[in-house]
Amino acid sequence: MNPNLRKGEIHRLLSDAFTPESLGVEDESYLHEGHEGAKDGRGHFRVLIIAEAFEGKSMIERHRMIYRVLDDMMRLDIHALAIDAWSPDELDR
């Protein structure tokens, strides 16, 4: 899958799963050119997501929720995923 399709698919899957107030997906693969993990063609991505689904969840629980949604892509299309996941109430403080 090409990088633009990967980015779009990550966005679609997370949107469908969490109905976020805000969601940004960045392809940072260019930062990892020559990196061992990038040689197989999988990408490096960064996600910023704000969703009520994360309310009351620890950061580890939030990451696990996201990894579950992206499970197939993590095996085939994503080498590394940086995650910033927040609930809306955390940003109101």
Image (cartoon, rainbow, N blue to C red):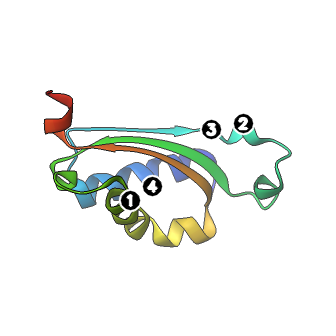
Query: How many angstroms separate mark 3 from mark 1 (CA)?
Result: 22 Å
- Tell me what residue is drawn at x 74 percent, y 57 percent: 41
For mark 4, what is the residue?
9
The label on residue 30 is: 2
SS label for mark 2: helix
Identify the amino acid type marked 1.
Ile
Image disc number at residue 60: 1
**Residue that protrudes farthest toward the top in the picture:** 93
How far apart marks 4 and 2 lie (CA) works out to 19 Å
Between marks 3 and 1 in the image, the one whose residue lies nearer the viewer: 1
Q: Name the residue at 55% across, 66% down.
A: 74
Mark 4 nearby-residue class (10 Å; few <14, some 14–19, many ≥20): some
Q: Quadrant of residue 16?
A: bottom left
Crowding near the residue tagged with mark 1, few <14, some 14–19, many ≥20 C-alpha atoms within 10 Å = few
Q: Is residue 16 left or right of residue 3?
A: left
The residue singled out by tag 3 in the image is 28
Residue 92 location, x and y as percent? Answer: 14, 28
In contact (CB < 8 Å): disc 3 and disc 2? yes
